[in-house]
Image (cartoon, grey):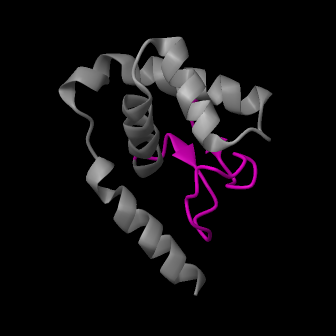
Amino acid sequence: KLRVQRTKTLYKLHSFWQLDEALIPIAHLWVRTFCALLIENPQVRASSLIREAAEMTGIEENQGDRIFRYSLWNKHLSMDWDQPLLLNKPASALGLKSNVVG
């Protein structure tokens, strides 16, 4: 059952393997901002962290969500793959962690 969940989550993320050209210039800043928020507020819902990082970097929430999913797919962020990606859960409950160095 655990492998089934991982496969379902990866299937939902596969379309985010590449970013729209317009998001490429802001993606690195957004990921670093999200990771800083994640470290400071691990008990906050993932959706709230995504929204706050988007506001702080001057992009729309849906653009932040795309960068978030792209970052999971491309391993800039990691999570507990054995559970569903439910963004209304706290980031810590999802096992969200930064893989960004520096």
Left or right, residue 87 beside residue 90? left
Locate residue 24: give its quadrant. Answer: top left
Residue 81 visible from this viewpoint = yes
Queried whether the magenta region covers residue 28, the answer comes back as no
Residue 47 placement (x, y as % from top left)? 58, 40
Query: Would residue 81 be found to the left or right of residue 94 on screen?
Result: left
Which SS does the magenta portion mostly show? loop
Give the residue at x 37% y 39%: 66
Which residue, as the protein is rendered here, is positioned at the far bottom? 1
**Which residue is most to the left?**
21
Q: Is residue 91 magenta?
A: yes
- Give above or below for 96 relative to 55: below
State whether residue 61 is above or below residue 65. above
Q: Which residues are magenta?
A: 74-102
Q: Residue at x 43, y 22 (%)?
A: 28
Give left or right: position of 66 versus 94.
Answer: left
Q: How far across and down, in percent of the image, does residue 96 sit?
A: 65, 47
Q: Quadrant of residue 26?
A: top left
Taking the image as drawn, is residue 102 in sight?
A: no
The residue lying toward the viewer, choosing from 86 and 102, is 86
Toward which corner of the image does residue 102 lie, by quadrant?
A: top right
100 vs 84, nearest the viewer: 84
State the image coordinates of residue 93 (x, y, percent, origin top left). 74, 55
Q: Is residue 59 left or right of residue 90?
A: left
Count of residue discs: 0
Q: Estimate the x, y position of residue 20 in percent, counting from the top left.
A: 22, 32
Quadrant assignment for the N terminus: bottom right
Residue at horizontal 31 percent and vertical 58 percent from the top:
14
